[in-house]
Image (spheres, rainbow, N blue to C red):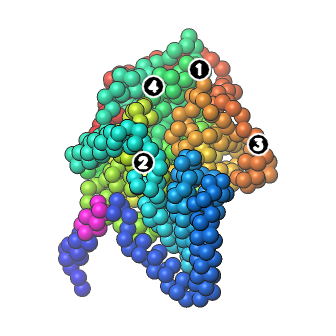
Amino acid sequence: MEQPAYKQIKNSIDRAMHAFEGRVTQGISPASLSMAYMDWLIHLAHSPGKLGELTENLVRKNAAYWVWSARAATDPDTPPLIEPLAQDRRFNDPAWHKFPFNVMAQGFLMREQWWHYATTGIAGVSRHHENVISFAARQFLDMLSPTNFPLTNPRIIDRAIETGGTSIYKGMENLLEDVQNYTTGTAPSCENYCVGHNLATTEGQVIYRNRLIELIQYSPKTADVHAEPILIIPAWIMKYYILDLSEHNSMVRYLVEKGHTVFMISWHNPDAADRDLAMKDYINRGVRDAVKAISSIVPDQQIHAVGYCLGGTLLATTAAAMARDEDNRIKTLSLFTAQTDFTEAGELMLFIDESQLSYMEDMMWDRGYLDTTQMSGAFTLLRSYDLLWSRIVSEYWLGERPPMNDLMAWNSDSTRMPYKMHTEYLSRMFLHNDLASGRFIVDDRPVSLRDIRMPIFCVATEKDHVAPWHSVYKLHGLVNTDLTFVLTSGGHNAGIVSEPGHPRRRYRMALNRPEDKYISADEWYQRYEASEGSWWEPWSEWLAENSSGRTAPPAMGNAEAGYAPLAPAPGSYVLEK
């Protein structure tokens, strides 16, 4: 029988090796990828019909391609052989329709199409493994796209000629700057944006602090306020001030100017000492402590609770526990890009299986937390064109560095997630879907979202790769209350930071009552037409409709109850690196 100490040493060796590998692979498990590859390869090798179909397709497509290429070389008006997908913007420039670049583009699209056939529709391959292999093939082909290389991209060639080569020189300067920043761990220069100076400037005070949160109470800007205060719970994967960016697009400032008393949780940025912080700590020391503080400062009033991304999932979980325990201090829920059912959580599920979670757990075990660089690999791959290849072309080959803006400055302000909490979150939420299944435990008892009876305002975004709107929509099947669902243009962050007056913003909105029949997400999309403008405005009206009137603003904090002002907003936790 093995001695416990010896077994612990062996486990430590395994974990140390996985942690070292993870730094090289950006957190992608080689074992998980290998299993998907072998599942696909073995089933493909035992599918002679599929192999014959692929061979016939290859021969036929290549024959058509060479005939088309000969015609396109002499006739510039030759229609394309293959039309790119609607969302594929790589070949939109008119220069790609001229010889020889049109031939390169069409050849690439043909290979991309063939590999899609080769990696899908093979009997016996698990759906998860099929998705992984298809995704991996797309990533590999994206890397080989003719748009990425200076000798095969007409935009790069034309730009270099126009500038006498200075575009390439400037691009190499940008590359050297980025390499230097990466090797030294320096964040991109954000000298024009500073937290407390022109970011997160809405006036307020930190009125409570514990190991995990600072609670900010914002100063009123109206003579009277809505009776019920607002508590905003951002995701701990991000700094809270995405909701308090510049003055013109600050959601916090917008709400305060509309006559709301606003409280904001600012999460502590965990380090190795916080490795054992768990989901229950985020519930108890986060949401529950904040609700307790607000109830002391604004007594005898319920709270409009708002949760963003992971903060929305945490809020829904806590609200279900409070409803189960007949705690009615929350009056309404507003959930922004928050998933509660993870069965179809989008392409992030490509990185979620038992092998991948074990690997990621070992990576976090090494340091006690998951940092931004370990998280960035998956998010970059999900949007490889926008976040990687188009940036390489624009900044390094064309020499065009986009100017820093407030959202980019916020995005570069990184955070970490503690080992135990993130392990629990990925396993219980993503992998096993405990919350939607009624198996998530809070205070030693399971919670069910069907216990929630307060009105809900749920916002999803059309181009969200983190919380796809079809996944967010699943809340309709989990709750038994009035649910106002909003689908807005934009992505996970830009769709939420959608202040009134922002150009090219639109949204769809509909109320679903408990007695209404269920309709699918796609049917819902077809049924309700888009309205131009910002969804903030109907949300503000919804909050007002669910409030009980106006009253004098509450005092700043409550010293007698232990909530004296501690420091001006934005506080100290948001400044932690």
Q: Residue at x 52, y 15 (%)?
A: 221
Q: How many numbered tags mark residues here?
A: 4
Tell us which disc is closer to us: 1 or 3.
3
In this rendered view, identify the residue nearer to me: 62 or 19: 62
Highlighted magenta segment, given as a residue range: 16-24
Q: Residue at x 34, y 26 (%)?
A: 192
In this rendered view, identify the residue nearer to me: 226 or 445: 226
Q: Residue at x 45, y 48 (%)?
A: 390
Dot placed on the residue nearer the N-terminal end, 1 or 3: 1
Mark 4 belongs to which amino acid? Ser
Estimate the spatial distance between the alpha carbons at disc 2 and disc 4, rounded to whole Å: 38 Å
Number of the label disc, if any, that sits on residue 528? 3
Number of the label disc, if any, that sits on residue 94? none
In this rendered view, identify the residue nearer to me: 188 or 253: 188
Tell us which disc is closer to us: 2 or 4.
2
Residue 53 position (above or below residue 391): below
Residue linked to disc 4: 246
Number of the label disc, if any, that sits on residue 258? 1
Q: Is residue 564 visible?
A: no
Mark 3 belongs to which amino acid? Tyr
Estimate the spatial distance between the alpha carbons at disc 1 and disc 4, rounded to whole Å: 17 Å
